[in-house]
Image (cartoon, helix red, strand yellow):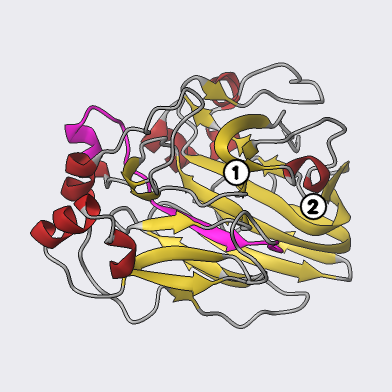
């Protein structure tokens, strides 16, 4: 088996969504207010569907059940069964997202969920969002000062919780790792690729007093968030790395996933003989042709390809920047 899989994007309308995903993903349709494009998802109720090839129309869950370790890797299938373990998406924020936190696995299970959510963001070219003026987009990631749970509750109640958060001006290529428990928010004007555990559990801490389409204040999860927050303060939450040309540049490694970025302008061979895992390739800029065991498919900005564990080499030809993720 050597198929390279593409899926129909699952487009999510949001209160804070923008209008860039249509052009970024080369979709000929109006997409105002679409904040997220779920590229590869095994989340219940939002499972990806194969877009082309002999398995067209099959769900990702059906694919895992049929192909098992040949698709995801032997150990991954033993560990996760039919559940695909990662969710990858592109996010376009025209307004600030809520200040939020995700639980770890232990806390999530206490609340009836299978997994918590550890994630990472890779920032793409930003633009001026609502309220950003002439400034670069910003995001919040982590605490910049020590606070107690009691102080946290007071700051949420008096609308000052943002004062305790580290704020970053973001540019293309910036990367942030967000383990479960770290408070965060994507700011207006940001366009990011997100890689995370298969989970849709988000505890909303603060929402800037916004109302939904029916005029109601959106629900907050202050108590659940308090149970999840890691109050550790770090000097810097931005992941520092040295970009490489025509070589693999590792940017994240944790028990949930490992991610690297490639910036290529010459033919390159990707060697996967050393891992027993699926690989997800997310196009960030440019375009290329992928050749695996004689099967050729395209990868360009806004596209995502799932590479099965049986594929051990891929030749990439073109000028392209992309993310590579596996477990």
Residue drawn at (59%, 58%) of the image? 131
Q: Nearer the viewer, residue 240 or 236?
A: 236
Sequence-first tag of 1 and 2: 1
- Residue 89, numbered circle: 1
Residue drawn at (58%, 56%) of the image? 188
Residue 109 magenta: yes
Side (left or right) of 275 relative to 21: left
Residue 272 appears in the figure: no
Q: Nearer the viewer, residue 275 or 301?
A: 301
Image spot of residue 292 (x, y percent): 81, 47
Q: CA distance from mark 1 to mark 2?
A: 13 Å
**Residue holding disc 2:** 301
Q: Nearer the viewer, residue 311 or 61?
A: 61
Mark 1 neighbour class, 10 Å CA radius: few under 14, some 14 to 19, many 20 or more: many
Label 1's element?
A: strand
* CB-based contact (under 8 Å), mark 1 and mark 2: no
Side (left or right) of 75 relative to 129: left
Q: Which residues are magenta?
A: 106-127
């Amino acid at each position: 088996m050597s198929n390279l899989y593409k899926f129909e994007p699952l487009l999510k309308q949001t209160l804070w969504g923008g209008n860039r995903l249509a052009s970024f993903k080369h979709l000929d349709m109006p997409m105002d207010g679409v904040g997220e494009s779920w590229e590869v998802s095994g989340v219940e109720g939002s499972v990806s569907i194969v877009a082309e090839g002999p398995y067209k129309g099959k769900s990702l869950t059906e694919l895992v059940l049929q192909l098992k370790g040949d698709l995801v890797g032997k150990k991954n299938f033993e560990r996760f069964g039919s559940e695909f373990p990662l969710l990858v998406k592109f996010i376009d924020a025209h307004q600030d997202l809520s200040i939020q936190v995700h639980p770890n696995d232990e806390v999530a299970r206490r609340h009836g969920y299978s997994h918590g959510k550890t994630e990472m963001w890779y920032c793409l070219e930003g633009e001026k969002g609502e309220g950003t003026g002439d400034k670069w987009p910003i995001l919040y990631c982590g605490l910049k000062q020590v606070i107690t749970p009691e102080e946290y509750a007071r700051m949420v109640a008096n609308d000052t919780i943002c004062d305790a958060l580290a704020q970053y001006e973001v540019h293309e290529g910036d990367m942030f790792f967000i383990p479960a428990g770290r408070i965060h928010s994507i700011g207006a004007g940001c366009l990011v690729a997100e890689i995370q555990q298969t989970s849709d559990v988000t505890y909303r801490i603060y929402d800037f007093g916004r109302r939904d389409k029916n005029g109601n204040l959106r629900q907050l999860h202050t108590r659940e968030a308090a149970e999840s927050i890691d109050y550790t303060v770090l000097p810097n939450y931005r992941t520092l790395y040295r970009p490489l040309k025509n070589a693999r540049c590792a940017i994240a490694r944790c028990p949930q996933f490992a991610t690297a970025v490639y910036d290529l302008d010459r033919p390159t061979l990707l060697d996967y003989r050393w891992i027993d895992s699926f690989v997800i390739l997310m196009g960030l800029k440019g375009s290329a042709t992928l050749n695996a065991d004689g099967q050729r498919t395209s990868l360009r900005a806004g596209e995502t390809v799932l590479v099965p564990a049986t594929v051990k080499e891929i030749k990439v030809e073109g000028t392209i920047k992309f993310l590579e993720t596996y477990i």
